Amino acid sequence: MAKASFHKGQRVYVKPVGTWAAIEHVLPQWVKGVEEPLKIQYDVGLGREFQAHELTAEEREPDRPDLIETEVWRIHRAPNKMRPELQDARYPFPGTFPVVVTDERDWGGWRVPMAEYDRDPERIERQSRMIVNSMRLLRIARELIDFSKDQPHETAPQLQQLAQQAEIVLQSIYRSSTTMAAPDSIAAE
């Protein structure tokens, strides 16, 4: 019994000919009374049928995971070793400062110089919460874009405009550094 190794439309390398081709037809050879085909041949438009051992599938590089789906950022409170005396009321979390970490080992992430934190601790705390929740906002933006594309007639014009703006933001995030737009160009739109 034979199982199909390739499917219609799949790009394969044809070894006897030494070229790439797309499978046009999958041709099973059936025998009466048997539920599965005895052998399967493939028509790739080169004048004859080929068997599976004469073809090689195109190797695709594995998809990289999407950062929006895989990254989880969180706030890690680090003790303020340099200035432990900071216990007054102007600090939201006395004796600590926020560190936004992007992995489970608390290595990578966003850190703030102590002088910057001393200047306005509430602002730094707010920024850290913004950074941590940015991935959630990106997921919401992607869902808004998908919804407006899947159901364009049921999406209000205001939502379609928001989806277009969200798409511009996501494109600017995923654009390579060589084609990066100026930072103020998105804010102006």
Image: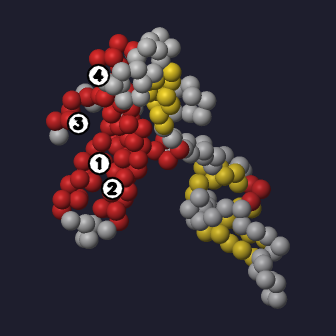
Q: Which residue is mark 1?
A: 166
Distance between mark 4 and mark 3 Cα atoms: 27 Å
Q: Mark on residue 186?
A: 3
Q: Which residue is mark 2?
A: 145
Distance between mark 3 and mark 2 Cα atoms: 17 Å
The 10 Å Cα crowd at callout 3, few under 14, some 14 to 19, many 20 or more, is: few
Q: Is residue 10 above or below residue 120?
A: below
Q: Is residue 154 above or below residue 60?
A: below
Q: Is residue 147 above or below residue 120?
A: below
Q: Amino acid at mark 3?
A: Ile
Mark 4 vs 1, N-terminal side: 4
* Rendering coords of residue 40 (x, y %): 74, 69
Marks 4 and 1 close (CB-CB < 8 Å): no
* Rendering coords of residue 89 (x, y %): 33, 25
Marks 1 and 2 close (CB-CB < 8 Å): yes
Give the side of residue 62 with respect to residue 187, left or right: right
* Rendering coords of residue 149 (x, y %): 32, 61
Element marked by disc 2: helix
Number of the front mark, 4 or 2: 4
Quarter of the figure that contains the C terminus: top left
